[in-house]
């Protein structure tokens, strides 16, 4: 227990949430001897695999995890979204999240929140104790609030993200070195502000885990060249989790969670090329560069990851599918997706989710009509250049998964049964004894 806590004596319980982006539960639970701090957290508290969201993409997952609400309410469906009534697209940022974050509720209750490196939080909010925005932030100076936070982080050589271009090289040594440097500085920053002991909610995310998984996960799963490097990196993450846990005051409960799982990648599937070949999609030009180049003959188009939109008359500018044919056309596209096989003869898609089953809220007007959840090994891409092969390989050998998401709660009374990302925000509030209405969330407290 820190000095500040002893002095204030208010007795309000606190929570420290540490995100480990993209870390699958099986990796940690099947190697307890390598990851003793995760094992101890599970033994002393509660741990289990949970589900991610539809679609399991970080830009959609973190807004849902931090609000307890589905993308129809957050308004964020992925790395790229489309403007209502147009073919224009944009990259969602923090201000595009249309629901209260868990730290907004903490601050509204008169408590303090420190928020560090959470994806989709740029620009940093000025109504929290301190914030360092994460993924998609242009630079540290613009990402940190207040100014003294940025000044301190510069002394650590803190960086917003690992350099993913290094992972594209055949020799991964430089990428691995950069990943270690990134996670080292992130740990030092987290530890420093945890030990400030002036917060009620500490919310920090290690995103480097996701980056390492994208470029080394198949090496881990299939005994590749960089398996030992992969495991050594995760042993460091495990050590950092243990040291952060030791640094916490006695009145703080630790939660560690990922936003989705991970699996090996065998094929990238370029779905707009598949749609073009199958007669679903056509372009006005021989060399399309953006969504606006699609023609009036188009019946469907795709965004990553596995999001499909019917080119609906009256909704899209050049919509070709009449509203009374919508169900029939969507059912046919769903059937075609479910039947698609890869070069290895395996089904590409595990299941196809209709929009009304996954999304509800004031912002479901930009929801995809279908979301394909892939089988292991198939990473669902889109693109609009029209010159790609349907099945291809790239520099990445790991991909997101809907299942195998991790959740650890340092509370033996927690119950993690059929849980998903929507349950985390109400669990944090319950642990902090902050009031909320049961209907505020798509999930429920696990304690």
Image (cartoon, rainbow, N blue to C red):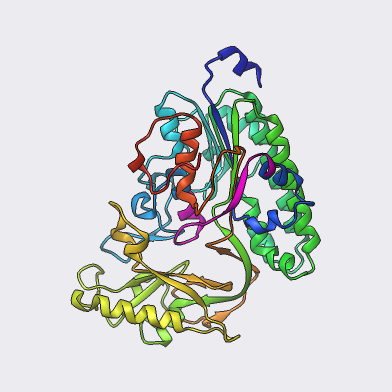
The image quadrant of residue 403 is bottom right
Task: Give yes or no for residue 90 being in the magenta stretch.
Answer: no
In the image, taking residue 143 as reference, residue 244 lies left or right, namely right
The answer to whether residue 295 is visible is: no
Task: Return the x and y of residue 290 as percentages of the image width and height.
Answer: 40, 70
Task: Give yes or no for residue 49 being in the magenta stretch.
Answer: yes
The answer to whether residue 311 is visible is: yes
Task: Return the x and y of residue 2 as percentages of the image width and height.
Answer: 66, 20
In the image, taking residue 431 as reference, residue 30 lies left or right, namely right
Question: Which residue appears at 49% of the width and 30% of the height?
Answer: 432
In the image, taking residue 413 as reference, residue 430 lies left or right, namely left
Task: Return the x and y of residue 146 as percentages of the image width and height.
Answer: 52, 29
Q: Which residues are magenta?
A: 43-62
Question: Which residue appears at 72% of the width and 46% of the height?
Answer: 39
Task: Return the x and y of residue 140 as percentages of the image width and height.
Answer: 58, 40
In the image, taking residue 410 as reference, residue 290 lies left or right, namely left
């Amino acid at each position: 227990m820190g000095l500040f806590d002893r002095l204030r004596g208010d007795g309000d319980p606190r929570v420290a949430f540490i995100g480990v982006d993209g870390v699958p539960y099986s990796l940690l639970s099947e190697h307890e001897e390598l990851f003793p701090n995760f094992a101890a957290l599970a033994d002393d508290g509660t741990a289990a695999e949970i589900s991610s969201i539809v679609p399991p993409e970080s830009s959609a997952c973190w807004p849902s995890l931090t609000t307890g609400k589905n993308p129809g309410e957050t308004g964020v469906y992925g790395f790229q979204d489309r403007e209502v009534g147009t073919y224009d697209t944009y990259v969602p940022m923090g201000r595009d999240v249309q629901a209260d974050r868990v730290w907004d509720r903490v601050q509204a209750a008169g408590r303090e929140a420190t928020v560090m490196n959470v994806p989709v939080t740029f620009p940093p909010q000025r109504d929290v104790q301190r914030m360092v925005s994460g993924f998609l932030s242009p630079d540290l100076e613009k990402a940190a609030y207040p100014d003294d936070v940025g000044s301190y982080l510069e002394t650590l050589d803190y960086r917003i993200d690992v350099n993913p271009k290094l992972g594209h090289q055949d020799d991964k040594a430089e990428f691995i070195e950069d990943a270690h440097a990134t996670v080292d500085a992130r740990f030092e920053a987290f530890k420093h502000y945890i030990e400030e002991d002036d917060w009620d909610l500490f919310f920090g995310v290690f995103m480097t885990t996701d980056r390492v998984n994208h470029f080394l996960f198949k090496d881990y799963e299939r005994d590749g060249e960089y398996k030992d490097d992969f495991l050594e990196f995760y042993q460091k993450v495990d050590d950092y989790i243990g040291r952060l846990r030791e640094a916490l005051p006695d009145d703080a409960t630790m939660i560690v969670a990922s936003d989705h799982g991970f699996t090996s990648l065998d094929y990238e599937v370029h779905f707009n090329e598949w749609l073009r070949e199958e007669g679903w999609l056509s372009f006005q030009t021989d060399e399309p560069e953006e969504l606006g180049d699609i023609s009036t003959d188009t019946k469907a188009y795709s965004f990553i990851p596995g999001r499909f939109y019917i080119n609906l008359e009256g909704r899209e500018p050049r919509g070709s599918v009449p509203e009374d044919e919508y169900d029939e056309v969507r059912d046919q596209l769903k059937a075609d997706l479910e039947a698609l096989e890869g070069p290895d003869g395996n089904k590409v898609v595990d299941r196809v989710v209709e929009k009304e089953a996954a999304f509800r809220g004031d912002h479901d007007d930009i929801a995809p009509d279908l979301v394909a959840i892939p089988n292991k090994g198939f990473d669902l891409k889109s693109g609009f250049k029209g010159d790609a092969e349907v099945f291809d390989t790239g520099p990445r050998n790991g991909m997101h998964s809907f299942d195998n998401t991790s959740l650890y709660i340092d509370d033996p009374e927690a119950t993690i049964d059929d849980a998903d990302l929507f349950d985390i925000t109400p669990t944090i509030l319950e642990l902090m004894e902050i009031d909320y209405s049961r209907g505020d969330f798509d999930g429920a407290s696990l304690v």
